[in-house]
Structure formats: C-alpha cells, structure tokens
Image (tube, rainbow, N blue to C red):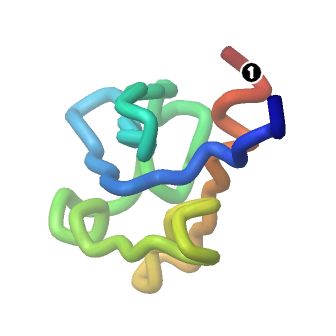
Amino acid sequence: MPKVEPLAVDAKCTEHSLVMVLADGREISAPLTWFPRLLKATPTQRSEWRLIGGGIGVHWEAIDEDISVESLLAVE
C-alpha cells in the first residue's frame, strides 16, 4: 500500500491547544505551550491562518509561524 502524506484541511486554536483536522478525518492536537508564538498571539491572530503546501502545514502571517502536520504527528 503506498504511503499517503497526511494533509491538513482545517485548523483552530482553543484556549489551550492547537487542533488540526486532517483530510483522512483524524484530528490531532498539541498544547499551545509547545508554540510560544501562538501562545502569545491574540485570539484574532490565532484565527488568521492559511494552509501551506497543499495542506502539509499551517501558516500564521501576523506572528510568522509555520507548523507542519508531520511535526505534530511525530510527537504523538
């Protein structure tokens, strides 16, 4: 079976976590404390993200932060 690269289709930040929804239906999350820029960002800044690389990660322009799906999966 060929390896399928996990791709994000949605992202959100709760008060304490970053949550990414993957194209295969999985949701992965990590504490905001792992990402100091996101932790210090305002709720508005956290909500202003875009997918990068066709879903390989998420970018927040206002805080210059990129987080890849692969990096979240590597620590789970």
Q: Amino acid at mark 1?
A: Val
Residue sitting nearer the eye, 55 or 72: 55
Residue drawn where x is 58% and y is 45% of the image: 35
Residue furthest front as drawn: 1
Looking at this view, name the residue that lies furthest to the bottom.
61
Q: Element under label 1?
A: helix
Q: Could you say which quadrant of the image residue 27 lies in? A: top left
Residue drawn at the location 33% of the way across and 51% of the way down:
11
Question: Quick one: quadrant of the N terminus?
Answer: top right
Say which quadrant the C terminus sits in. Answer: top right
| Above or below, 7 relative to 34 | below
Q: Position of residue 17 (x, y in %)?
A: 36, 30
Query: In this figure, which residue is indicated by the disc labeled 1?
Result: 75
Between residue 72 and residue 5, name the one nearer to us. Answer: 5
Is 11 positioned to the left or the right of 47 in the image?
right
Which quadrant would residue 51 be assigned to in this image? bottom left
Q: Nearer the viewer, residue 64 or 24?
A: 24
Height in image: 2 above or below 42? Answer: above
